[in-house]
Image (cartoon, rainbow, N blue to C red):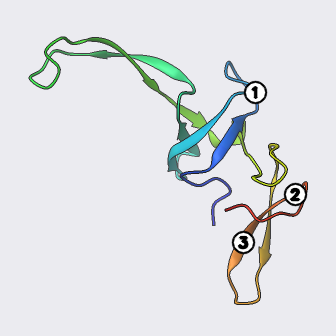
């Protein structure tokens, strides 16, 4: 089970977007990177095509290292580290290390 998953709300711990938060759009566990909504915006130079006849410069999200992200706990509303526990039916759950609440 991953520490950060698609759909999680995360906070950036370091870099130019430090302190900002956003929703995870995509995770690449083999590259240790994630795409976060409206964070780490980079300029992409788009070539003219039939789908985009204008072309030009487009700002889009760039990948961020997972080590720079901390999941936000829905209970205490603070960035937290992730702990693990096994529930009674054998399911592994992610826990907030601050308040011991279950992360979705």
Is mark 2 in CB contact (under 8 Å) with mark 3? no
The residue most toward the right is 98
Whole-percent x, y for residue 38 in the image: 53, 28
Where is mark 2, residue-wise?
Answer: 97
- Please give the name of the residue rendered at 55% of the width and 51% of the height, measured from the top-left corner: 7
Drawn side of residue 55 relative to residue 22, left or right: left
Which quadrant of the structure image shows residue 12? top right
Q: Dot 2 lies on which element?
A: loop
Whole-percent x, y for residue 53 in the image: 13, 15
41 above or below 88?
above
Near mark 3 (Cα within 10 A), the count class, few <14, some 14-19 or many ≥20, is: some
Q: Which mark is residue 93?
A: 3
Q: Distance between the residues labelled 2 and 3?
A: 12 Å
Whole-percent x, y for residue 82 in the image: 78, 57
Q: Dot 3 lies on which element?
A: strand
Where is mark 1, residue-wise?
Answer: 19
- Please give the name of the residue rendered at 14% of the width and 26% of the height, measured from the top-left corner: 51
- Please give the name of the residue rendered at 76% of the width and 32% of the height, measured from the top-left corner: 13
Is mark 1 in CB contact (under 8 Å) with mark 3? no
Is mark 1 in CB contact (under 8 Å) with mark 2? no
**Who is closer to the viewer here, 30 or 91?**
91
Give the mark nearer the N terminus: 1 vs 3.
Answer: 1
Q: Dot 1 lies on which element?
A: loop
Give the mark nearer the N terminus: 1 vs 2.
Answer: 1
Near mark 1 (Cα within 10 A), the count class, few <14, some 14-19 or many ≥20, is: few
Whole-percent x, y for residue 77 in the image: 80, 45
Which quadrant of the structure image shows residue 91? bottom right
Q: Distance between the residues labelled 1 and 2?
A: 19 Å
- Please give the name of the residue rendered at 64% of the width and 53% of the height, measured from the top-left corner: 4
Near mark 2 (Cα within 10 A), the count class, few <14, some 14-19 or many ≥20, is: some
Drawn side of residue 20 relative to residue 27, left or right: right
């Amino acid at each position: 089970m991953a520490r950060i998953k698609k759909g999680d709300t995360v906070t950036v711990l370091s870099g130019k977007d430090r302190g900002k938060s956003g929703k995870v759009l995509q995770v690449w566990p083999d590259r240790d990177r994630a795409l976060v909504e409206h964070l780490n915006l980079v300029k992409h130079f788009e070539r003219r095509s039939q789908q985009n006849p204008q072309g030009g410069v487009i700002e889009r999200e760039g990948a961020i290292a997972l080590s720079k992200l901390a999941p936000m706990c829905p209970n205490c509303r603070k960035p937290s580290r992730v702990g693990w526990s096994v529930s009674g039916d054998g399911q592994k759950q992610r826990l907030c290390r601050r308040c011991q609440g279950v992360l979705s």
